[in-house]
Amino acid sequence: MSFESRVSSWDPKPQTRNMVPGTRNAECIAIALPKGRLLPFAMALFERMGITCLQDFADSRRLICEDADRRLQFLTLKPTDIPTYVERGAADMGIVGKDQLLEQRRDVYEPLDLRFGACRLVVAEPVELRKQDDPHSWSHLRLATKYPNLAEAYFGRKGIQAEIIKLNGSLELAPLVGLAERIVDLVETGQTLKENGLVEVEEITRSTARLIVNRASLKTKYRRVQDLIEEMRKQVEAHAARARE
């Protein structure tokens, strides 16, 4: 077969035409949404933009849904995985807490504070320990956390040697069973700490949900990505204005 014949017979998008429903569509902008506490806020943001396909996430166990008219595809992921998906281009954009961006330090573009999901990363300890504890006297600590990099950096700046135990859940249990003296964790109201006999001692940083973008997608899909960013920015500002009224 001649070169010209091969070129004329080549279909540049065979996978798109025969795509299995629910798989990654290269023609769409893929947006990763976080499972858990941030998902309802993220869904509400896109619904205010007129995107209704996200109801599929609320009504089923689906991990991917698509708005064919706007060429958008949404993925639901664990929040800890979203920076990796976006950095490596498996998703063009994503929504994730600032805490994960600070902890993971992924190479992504962060154009927008979405102003929801506000929480604080704090040091907490048992109430009984707090009664006799002076944080200014700390020299060595044993603590449990989901954020070892942030914890190590924070205590390193204070000149405190920290033995850090990495856990993925139920941090409040660690001091109760003697695994660690203290924890470093996210809090919203502090109610969970209180219910488990813990009290906040110091605040490390604050976090809200952020929009992140893959750097290659920002170049190759610039106009579409930029339009989405601006549309989301307008919605965030309008929502904040209504909240102040």
Image (cartoon, rainbow, N blue to C red):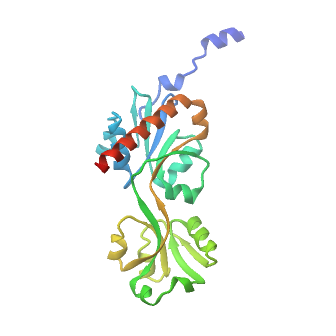
Q: Residue at x 29, y 44 (%)?
A: 59
Q: Is residue 49 above or below residue 178?
A: above
In the displayed structure, would residue 91 be above or below residue 152? Answer: above
Residue 227 versus residue 121 in the image, above or below: above
**Visible residue check, residue 42:** yes
Question: How far from the left and from the top, in percent, is residue 127?
Answer: 39, 84
Quadrant housing residue 57 = top left
* Residue 62 appears in view: no
Q: Quadrant of the N terminus?
A: top right
Tell me which corner region of the image, top left, top right, bottom left or bottom right, holds residue 11: top right
Residue 42 rendering spot, x and y as whole percentages: 38, 46
In the depicted view, which residue is nearer to us: 167 or 11? 167
Q: Residue at x 50, y 49 (%)?
A: 82
Count of numbered circles on the image: 0
The residue at the far bottom in this view is: 132
Residue 239 location, quadrant: top left
User: Residue 157: image x %, image y %?
Assistant: 63, 72
Q: Is residue 204 above or below residue 129?
A: above
Q: Residue 235 versus residue 29: which sits nearer the camera?
A: 235
Left or right position of 69 against 203: left
Left or right side of 58 for 154: right
Report the residue that reaches farthest toward the right: 2
Q: Residue at x 61, y 37 (%)?
A: 216
User: Which residue is pictured at 37% across the width and 55% down the height?
Assistant: 37
What is the x, y in percent for residue 22?
A: 42, 35
Does residue 240 appear to the left or right of 143 in the view shown?
A: left
